[in-house]
Image: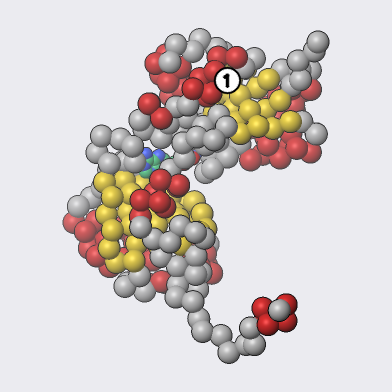
Amino acid sequence: MNKTGKLILVPTPIGNLEDITLRAIKILNAADVILAEDTRVLSKLMKHFGITNKLVSHHKFNEHKTLQNIISKIEQGLQIALISDAGTPGISDPGFLLVRTCVEHGIEVECLPGPTALIPALVVSGLPSDRFVFEGFLPQKKGRQKRLLQLADETRTMIFYESPHRLAKALSMFADFFGSERQACVCRELSKMFEEIKRGTIYELKEYYEINHPKGEIVIIIDGAPKKKTTHKNAEDDYV
Ligand code: SAM
């Protein structure tokens, strides 16, 4: 019987190698091809788990060019795994374009549950986790202010990815747009040896990181804006 081709997205650890799942190892061993963002970074992980499968480079600079080739391989029956440098592919990492193209071609897509930085950061922050928005990296220059302005009245908890050298500046902008007294949390080096979780107002965190220059990888969680009291007739009244 012919094997059915499919794309399988495989999350990899964001720091602690023990966070790989048994299923991820099984899929990485069994896949016909593994598409990897940086083959050097991933070969360390592969070596650690004794995975000898072939890695093919797939990153934001070649993903448009290689797309058609990948699609035809899957249509021929190959099972292709996609991994990024860390965490879940497609989350601030390549993956979306390939998934969308597979969906358009009626190709089966599977994503294994697994590591990603945003969820542990949100949950450990102590800020409401029932409703949230993931904003990823803010635009670096153009569009940054516009995006922050759009988010000023956002009532759900907000999640941002940021680089360590831009952290203090980002907190200063959050203070300007969201108010310095809003509660926030900076999660640094999650799951790694020097993991650090700092909670406080945006102002307190800005003061702290202006003096203590951070290193490593960072997620910022910001409390949503207080809900505005509305004078409108409660829409639910229409449904009782
Ligand atoms: N695909 C990844 C995921 O699922 O979270 C995100 C990749 S994105 C290129 C890298 C960013 O994720 C970092 O700049 C940082 O904001 C966040 N990140 C990744 N690992 C982290 C960690 N161990 N601790 C804190 N933030 C992390």
Q: Is residue 149 visible?
A: no
Q: Quadrant of ligand 1?
A: top left
Residue 135 placement, left or right of 3: left
Residue at point 49% right, 22% down?
22
SS of the residue at dot 1? helix
Q: Where is residue 104 in the image (x, y as percent from the top left)?
A: 79, 38
* Quarter where residue 240 is shown: bottom right
The amino acid on which the numbered mark 1 sits, given as a three-letter code, is Ile
Q: Where is residue 135 in the image (x, y as percent from the top left)?
A: 51, 55
Foreground of the two, 17 or 178: 17
Give the residue at the far left of this rendering.
Answer: 211
Task: Decide: is 234 above or below 7.
Answer: below
Q: Position of residue 121 (x, y in %)?
A: 39, 49
Foreground of the two, 130 or 71: 130
Tell me how the rendering is colored.
secondary structure
Residue at point 76% right, 20% down?
4
Give the residue at the far front of this rendering.
Answer: 240
Residue 125 placement, left or right of 93: left
Residue at point 35% right, 70% down?
182
Q: Write down the residue under mark 1.
A: 27
Task: Decide: is 82 above or below 129.
Answer: above
Residue at point 44% right, 27% down?
20
Foreground of the two, 16 or 38: 16
Residue 99 placement, left or right of 229: right
Residue 62 placement, left or right of 72: left
Q: Is residue 92 visible?
A: yes
* Quarter where residue 6 is shown: top right
Q: Where does the N terminus fall, quadrant-wise? A: top right
Q: How crowded is mark 1: few (under 14 residues within 10 Å), some or many (20 or more)?
A: some
Q: Position of residue 230 (x, y in %)?
A: 56, 85
